[in-house]
Amino acid sequence: MSETTLTPATLYIVATPIGNLGDISQRAIDILTQVDVIACEDTRHTGKLLSAFSIKNKTMSLHDHNERQRQDQVATMLQEGKTIALVSDAGTPLISDPGFHLVRHCRSLGLQVSPIPGACAAISALSVAGLPTDRFSFEGFLPSKSGARQATLTALADESRTMVFYDAPRRAIDTVQDIVTTLGGERYIVIARELTKTFETIHSDTAENLLTWLEQDANQLKGEMVLIIEG
């Protein structure tokens, strides 16, 4: 397999594994190896990924708290002809992760931005949910507090599309209880937890039955979770 050739002055948006390291593409490895610098949400976290593939490269932090400050620095580097990769802690950057402001800024300056596709928890969960996928709505993270969460769910009560959310498993019982309260106990939902990892769990049922299942198994309240609700 031939090595990927980089295009100068390009920002590469590189997807990384959401759990199983075997899901990274050779093209992603090539890009991360060859770019001048890797912008990452957490340099220590990304450092472990790079180490797993024997990639030695420069990294710089780019996260929610410094993205606006970093965007000019990154744009200047690109204008000088450098190549930069943007990664998140896991999955595809910008999907409920930092990067939107940077990409918009670079595109407004006419700079080249190129996607390097790969894992995405939302799409992976949707592909195994058994719910309609011809039209769906990605809603990002549900609010952490019950009142705001119920308000969000109530506003979506008449949504006909399949709805995809990210949520913390430790809140799963409270979240499903809020679904029962706002959308009804018969609403069909899917919980996809720890996707591609050792303890991957994909469970689907009515909200009422899922609530009982969660209350009986504390192990389901750990890790990373995607929640999918029937429209």
Image (cartoon, rainbow, N blue to C red):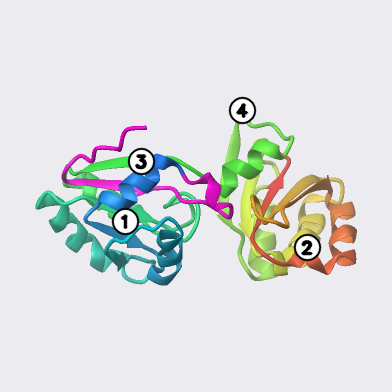
The kind of residue tagged 3 is Pro
Q: Which residue is mark 3?
A: 115
Q: What residue appears at the point 22 percent right and 49 percent down from the top-left corner?
A: 106
State the predominant SS element of the stretch in magenta.
loop
Q: Between marks 3 and 4, how big is the CA–CA gap? A: 23 Å
Q: Is residue 114 above or below residue 88?
A: above
Under circle 3, the secondary element is: strand
Q: CA distance from mark 2 to mark 1?
A: 35 Å
| Residue type (three-letter) at the residue carrying disc 2 | Gln
Residue position marked by numbered label 4 in the rendering: 134
Mark 3–mark 1 distance (CA, rounded to whole Å): 16 Å
| Region rendered in magenta | 1-24
Q: Is residue 124 left or right of residue 202?
A: left
Q: Residue at x 29, y 37 (%)?
A: 4
Taking depth in this image into account, of 107 and 81 the one nearest to the observer is 81
- Could you tell which of marks 4 and 1 lies nearer the N-terminus? 1
Towards the viewer: 112 or 55: 55
Residue 101: assigned label: 1
Quadrant placement of the N terminus: top left
